[in-house]
Image (cartoon, helix red, strand yellow):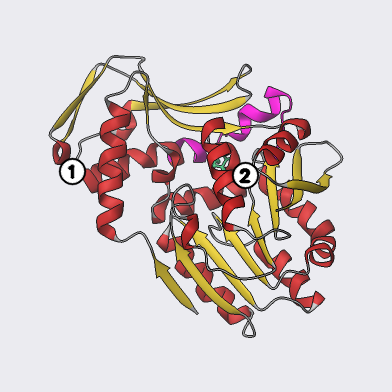
Amino acid sequence: MTLDQHLNDDYLARELRADVRTGLTADPRWLPPKWFYDARGSELFEEITRLTEYYPTRTERTLLEQHAAAVARTTEAKTLVEIGSGSSEKTRLLLDALVAHGTLGAFVPLDVSASALSSAVTSLAEAYPGLSIRGVVADMTRHLRHLPDGDSRLVAFLGGTIGNLVPAERAAFLSSLRSVLHEGEWLLLGADLVKDPAVLVPAYDDPAGVTAAFNRNVLHVINRELDADFDPAAFDHVAAWDPDHEWIEMRLRSRRDQLVRIAALDLDVPFTAGSELRTEISAKFHRSGLTAELEAAGFTPRHWWTDSRNWFGLTLAQA
Ligand code: AVJ
């Protein structure tokens, strides 16, 4: 078992500085969602996946339970690559099916969070002693070229994380993924589907306040890493459905007029009461739109699975 660090501390630090400067001096203000996931943020996300209101994780898990064997039979993959693997908990369903099918030799989880990845790699190495396991700490939007080459690879991109990319980023991501795959290799994509906002909004604004804490965590990250003085309690958590873009937008809304100092950037950021900072989009899809995006990137969708409520979609596409 190994862990490849493509994101050394220096790279991460520079990237965070650049993102915070760009995002907090833009109008409207924004921050990329990947900065949620320090150790605490990854823990809070795991807690979100257990909330009653947050249906995507358990819906996708049920789909994987039902269809992992078909994925194994169809792909006969020798290597499973998981992008944005986090704790790799649902991955066990795929690993079990591929091991049972007798083809799998290697697992390559890739994630931006070294802490989530190293604990996942440790526990998976114990559970699957016959597999070669190689964790890759990398930013999926930039470092796909660091994916180990292989043949018969299946790339799993689950959890609906594709929805955290805006359309142009999605197109770039899917094309660059296609370009590192050989013809005939596979992508298993999990995507959250458009549904009643009365279901969507509580999934991103739970009464227990776990998602609010997850959202505010990015301010703690900036305070710690960039010597800033955000008062996270001075920001309200906002989750809004945008019907035109068909995405959920998470924001932090300033409760009062305040000036935030980001010492490491020598930057002062004024917030007026009610002004907002966008921290995440979580796009929701229709089958037809996903198919079109996959085809535009050079993939051929081969299978589509959804639950009885049509809440979440799993699609298996071939390069
Ligand atoms: C990382 C894509 C699975 O967008 O639903 C959960 C992150 N943000 N609650 C999502 C998230 C707020 C999540 N994914």
Question: Who's the residue at 62% across and 16% down the image?
Answer: 244
Is residue 305 covered in magenta? no
Residue 245's place in the image compared with 21, above or below, is above
Residue 279: x, y in percent? 43, 32
Q: Nearer the viewer, residue 100 or 195?
A: 100
Pointer 1: what residue?
227
Ligand 1 lies under 8 Å from the Cβ of mark 1: no
Q: Decide if residue 58 is in sight here.
A: yes
Mark 1 Cα within 10 Å, few/some/many (few <14, many 20+)?
some
**Residue 27 got which mark?**
none
Q: Nearer the viewer, residue 225 or 17?
A: 17
Q: Specify the amino acid type for callout 2.
A: Leu
Q: CA distance from mark 1 to mark 2?
A: 33 Å
Left or right of residue 116: residue 160: right
Q: Decide if residue 205 is in sight here.
A: no
Residue 14's place in the image compared with 78, above or below, is above
Question: Who's the residue at 72% across and 31% down the image?
Answer: 289
Q: Secondary structure at mark 2?
A: loop
Left or right of residue 70: residue 295: left
Q: Specify the amino acid type for callout 1.
A: Asp
Residue at the far bottom in the pictured view: 130
Circle 1 or circle 2, nearest the eye: 1
**Residue extent of the magenta highlight:** 192-213
Contact between labelled residues 2 and 1, with CB atoms less than 8 Å apart: no
Left or right of residue 276: residue 165: right
Pointer 2: what residue?
51
Residue 12: x, y in percent? 31, 52
Ligand 1 placement by image quarter: top right
Question: Who's the residue at 35% across and 16% down the image?
Answer: 275
Residue 167: image quadrant is top right
